Image (spheres, grey):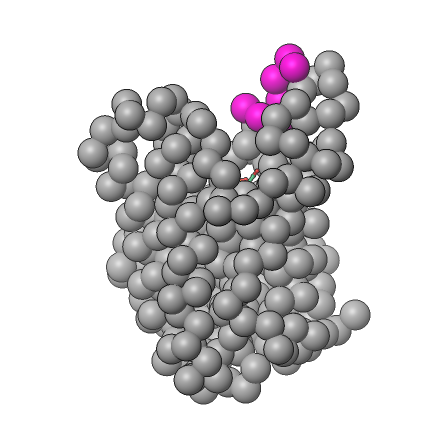
């Protein structure tokens, strides 16, 4: 399928996990893709993997909360491919586990800096490029935890709720510029990030996820998120904006 032929995409935090799967999928659907993350060696490894499949990929270092890195990401995209049609804001961190009331101010600031503030400013900085293209689109990676907070990652969950709000807050300003903006809210997806949830004794001895009522009773895969992002980025989703699609195997998803 070449739904995204001719398009240029930028995906943050895309050297592993869901971001890597998104970059891979967008490229397999015909897009030229700029991948990025904090560590140069991770970027190089991911670029090599994708180029081995003869996909059109460029890689650069971008720690999303560093303003200079965001500027470089967009500048390099322009230098390499000359335009931007699809922006996927995927980066997030969850550095603390435990009771939300134990969260330190510095930890709260770090979580919101990377997960919310950097997402907003990258989008703001990318809009002048996206508005020049027809059918351009932004996809934010939120989380099921944004709907029903996970007890041990409370501050992270609240930051993901903020992204649901950000998606809605940006609909009108983006529509005025001809850009669609949507989000996905993954459930528990098998990546390093969520290892504690699927790689423990209870999960290993049970086929069924024992929490948050996952109707399908299994963890999801990064590819299952990537296919949803590819749909939202494509013209198949031309009348969809301001929405969040839950990719959660039937997990509860109401605010
Ligand atoms: P992951 O497998 O741990 O991948 C993390 C990726 O992010 C790596 O490429 C890492 O590379 C990069 N990264 C980390 N911090 C970064 C930063 N500040 N700036 C740029 N890149 C950064 O994580 P994942 O599970 O794929 O998570 C991706 C997104 O999905 C996140 O927004 C997460 O909240 C969301 N999500 C995940 C799940 C899940 O169950 N896995 C569920 C719901 C939502 P470097 O180390 O080189 O920076």
Q: Please state which of residues 10 and 178 is positioned toward the viewer in this rendering.
A: 178
Residue nearest the viewer, comparing 228 with 80? 228
Q: Is residue 102 left or right of residue 30?
A: left
In this picture, which residue range is highlighted in magenta? Answer: 196-202
Q: Please tell me in which quadrant of the rendered image residue 197 appears.
A: top right
Name the quadrant of the N terminus: bottom right
* Rendered position, 131 above or below 14: below
In the rendered image of this protein, does residue 149 appear above or below residue 229?
above
Residue 201 percent location from the top left of the image: 64, 13
Taking the image as drawn, is residue 22 in sight? no
Residue name at image x 39 percent, y 38 percent = 156
Name which residue lies at 68% across and 26% down.
Answer: 209
Left or right of 111 on screen, residue 202: right
Q: x%, y% of residue 203?
A: 67, 20
In the rendered image, the residue lying farthest to the right is 1
Query: Can see residue 160?
Result: yes
Q: Quadrant of residue 135?
A: bottom right
Name the residue: 52% across, 75% down: 180
Predominant secondary structure in magenta? Answer: helix
Q: Tell me how many marks there are.
A: 0
Would you identify the image quadrant in which residue 129 lies?
bottom left
Residue 148 sits above or below residue 181 on the image: above
Whether residue 185 appears in magenta in the rendering, the answer is: no
């Amino acid at each position: 399928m070449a739904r995204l032929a001719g398009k240029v995409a930028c995906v943050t935090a895309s050297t592993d996990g869901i971001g890597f799967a998104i970059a891979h999928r967008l490229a397999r659907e015909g897009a030229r893709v700029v991948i990025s993350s904090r560590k140069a060696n991770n970027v190089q490894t991911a670029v090599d993997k994708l180029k081995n499949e003869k996909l059109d990929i460029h890689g650069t270092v971008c720690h999303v909360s560093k303003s200079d890195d965001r500027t470089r990401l967009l500048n390099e995209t322009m230098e390499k491919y000359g335009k931007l049609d699809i922006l996927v804001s995927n980066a997030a961190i969850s550095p603390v586990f435990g009771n939300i009331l134990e969260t330190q101010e510095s930890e709260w600031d770090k979580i919101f800096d990377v997960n919310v503030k950097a997402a907003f400013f990258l989008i703001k900085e990318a809009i002048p490029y996206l508005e020049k293209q027809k059918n351009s689109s932004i996809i934010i990676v939120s989380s099921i935890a944004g709907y029903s907070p996970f007890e041990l990652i409370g501050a992270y969950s609240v930051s993901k709720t903020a992204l649901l709000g950000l998606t809605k807050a940006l609909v009108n300003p983006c529509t005025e510029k001809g850009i669609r903006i949507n989000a996905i809210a993954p459930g528990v997806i098998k990546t390093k990030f969520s290892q504690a949830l699927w790689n423990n004794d209870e999960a290993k001895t049970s086929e069924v996820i024992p929490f948050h009522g996952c109707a399908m009773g299994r963890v999801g895969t990064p590819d299952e998120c990537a296919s949803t992002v590819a749909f939202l980025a494509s013209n198949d989703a031309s009348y969809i904006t301001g929405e969040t699609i839950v990719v959660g195997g039937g997990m509860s998803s109401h605010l």
